Image (cartoon, grey):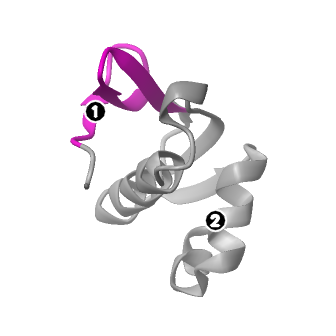
Amino acid sequence: MKPSITHNSNDNQFETTIDGHTGFISYQDQGDTIVYDHTIVPPELGGQGIGSALVKHALNYARSEGKKVIPECSFVASYIQKHPDYQDLVK
């Protein structure tokens, strides 16, 4: 099941809510760069690929906006290492 991910620009995060539990990836927009600083997935949603789906969505957003990425979150950095097609985004 692919989660429905929304961009909550007021809170600077991409988020998905499933069965009342919200997972999100937060960011800091720094003009031509976007810093992904936290990926949070509640234990109730763990093991379903939610974190990876959030990171993929966030990286695709950065690419579509022409922004470079600073992966401060270790989960984001690990995802980029495992998916070389995103390494060109890293600042």
The amino acid sitting under disc 1 is His
**Residue ranking furthest to the bottom:** 84
Q: Position of residue 66 (x, y in %)?
A: 38, 63
Residue to which mark 1 is pinned? 7
Q: How far separated are the C-alphas under marks 1 and 2?
A: 20 Å
**Residue range corresponding to the magenta coloring:** 4-26
In front here: 14 or 40? 40
Q: Residue at x 64, y 65 (%)?
A: 79
Compared with 27, 17 (above or below) is above
Residue 69 rendering spot, x and y as whole percentages: 59, 57
Question: Does residue 2 appear left or right of residue 84 in this picture?
Answer: left
Q: Nearer the viewer, mark 1 or mark 2?
A: 2
Left or right position of 3 against 71: left
Q: Quadrant of residue 73?
A: top right
Above or below, 78 against 24 in this view is: below
- The answer to which quarter of the image holds residue 76 is bottom right
Res. 91 visible in picture: no
Where residue 78 sits: x, y (%)? Answer: 73, 63
**Crowd tier of the residue under label 1, counting other residues whose Cα lies within 10 Å: few below 14, some 14–19, many 20 or above:** some
Mark 2 — residue?
Answer: 79
Residue 11, by quadrant, is top left
